[in-house]
Image (tube, rainbow, N blue to C red):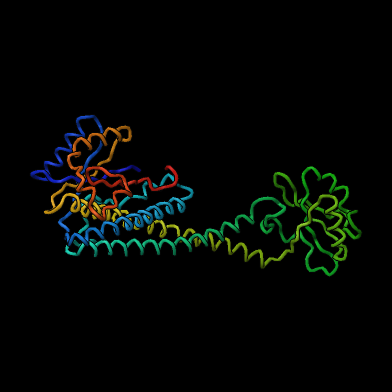
């Protein structure tokens, strides 16, 4: 995604002349920027006091809605974990022409303050909805990952439910019990030689290799119940690890069903969540651009005065020529750089880059990683 510069300059005899001058100046040197007119309608100006107060409020609102846009974009990337190359195609402003004002959403008969409040409520709603949806999906995803982790990893820690079978065990015996022991591959020979003598009452030739991973094997062995503690102690001394496991068909079935349920729920939620993120990214992004438009309008009126007469322009600078573009714009507009403009209260010029023309950067690099 790219960086854009939203600027405005006073109208000459007509705003078209202001536009033409910019186009001539940026085309003298090849490929400085791609330019578009940024159409801001005739908004209600209000009083100077209102404009000055609104300038500060809009700066805060700009920061907030930008953060919402970034959060939605980043969560889209998190949700599309296995296909991050598809993130960019989902982060589109719904094919909407963002350089034109949306009259339906933000009626220009409303005051500037009312329009900013509409955008603020919209941003807050998206932010709150995102928190709720993300929390629900993350909980589901976390629970599924915990179960998946149990079924993976070392034989010393992983679930054995999908490895063992009913026939591997002596069940429902008053005297006998089947134990499961993890043995390092380097100790297989030792196990076969010693398991029958680790304690009294081990059933001879009862051991079986049930499963292997890269490092170890899982062996079963049958012994009398009264010898369990002695067997565990001697096994530990010989570097064999007895797993605490009781074969319980109902519990194992419940675990598998829970895994299936969580996996199904995640798939069911995935599609609607991606659609919601796509739609609300578009909504938040368009709202953000309208805040930029409001800021350009307010600052242009404060800087250039009344009647309202300025041309807003959206520039996409060529990365290699940004410094040159700044120089060209300064040469074009340095005549505007009067001390009177610098001293207007409420513009907060000390807190941002100051140029003779009204300027706001729109940074569309919204993700923590490159796609």
Q: What is the quadrant of the N terminus in the image?
A: top left
Across and down, in percent, residue 317 comes to 28, 38
* Nearest the eye: 129 or 354: 354
Q: Is residue 14 left or right of residue 161?
A: left
Q: Is residue 206 left or right of residue 158?
A: right
In which quarter of the view is residue 47 placed? bottom left
Across and down, in percent, residue 183 comes to 78, 49
In which quarter of the view is residue 23 placed? top left
What residue do we see at 22% from left, 42% from top? 356
* Nearest the eye: 112 or 157: 112
Up/down of 260 relative to 195, above or below: below
* Nearest the eye: 243 or 8: 8
Across and down, in percent, residue 347 comes to 26, 53
Q: What is the quadrant of the C terminus in the image?
A: top left
Across and down, in percent, residue 93 comes to 30, 52
Which residue in the rendered view is the most extreme toward the top? 29
Q: Is residue 211 left or right of residue 72?
A: right
* Nearest the eye: 327 or 63: 327
């Amino acid at each position: 995604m790219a960086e854009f510069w939203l600027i405005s300059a006073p109208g000459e005899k007509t705003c078209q002349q202001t536009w033409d001058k910019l186009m001539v100046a940026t085309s003298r040197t090849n490929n400085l920027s791609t330019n578009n007119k940024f159409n801001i309608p005739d908004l209600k100006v209000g009083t100077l006091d209102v404009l000055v107060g609104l300038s500060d409020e809009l700066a805060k609102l700009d920061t907030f809605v930008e953060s919402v846009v970034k959060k939605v974009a980043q969560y889209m990337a998190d949700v599309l974990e296995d296909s991050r190359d598809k993130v960019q195609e989902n982060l589109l402003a719904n094919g909407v022409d963002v350089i034109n004002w949306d009259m339906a959403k933000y009626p220009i008969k409303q005051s500037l303050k009312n329009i900013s409040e509409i955008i603020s409520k919209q941003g807050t709603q998206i932010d709150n909805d995102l928190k709720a949806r993300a929390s629900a999906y993350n909980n589901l995803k976390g629970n599924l990952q915990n179960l998946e982790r149990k079924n993976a990893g070392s034989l010393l820690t992983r679930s054995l439910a999908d490895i063992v079978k009913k026939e591997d065990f002596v069940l429902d015996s008053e005297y006998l019990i089947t134990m499961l022991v993890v043995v390092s591959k380097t100790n297989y020979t030792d196990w076969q030689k010693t398991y029958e003598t680790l304690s009294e009452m081990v059933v001879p030739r009862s051991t079986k290799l049930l499963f292997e991973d890269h490092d170890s094997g899982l062996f079963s062995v049958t012994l009398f119940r009264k010898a369990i503690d002695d067997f565990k102690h001697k096994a530990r001394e010989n570097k064999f690890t007895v797993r605490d496991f009781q074969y319980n068909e109902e519990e194992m079935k419940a675990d598998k069903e829970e895994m299936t349920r969580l996996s199904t729920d995640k798939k069911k939620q995935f599609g609607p969540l991606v659609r919601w993120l796509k739609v609300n990214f578009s909504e938040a992004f368009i709202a953000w651009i309208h805040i930029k438009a409001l800021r350009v309008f307010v600052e242009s009126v404060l800087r250039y005065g009344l009647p309202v007469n300025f041309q807003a322009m959206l520039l996409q600078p060529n990365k290699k020529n940004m410094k040159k573009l700044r120089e060209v714009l300064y040469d074009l507009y340095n005549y505007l750089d009067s001390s009177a403009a610098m001293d207007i209260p409420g513009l907060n010029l000390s807190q941002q880059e100051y140029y003779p023309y009204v300027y706001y950067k729109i940074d569309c690099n919204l993700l923590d990683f490159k796609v």
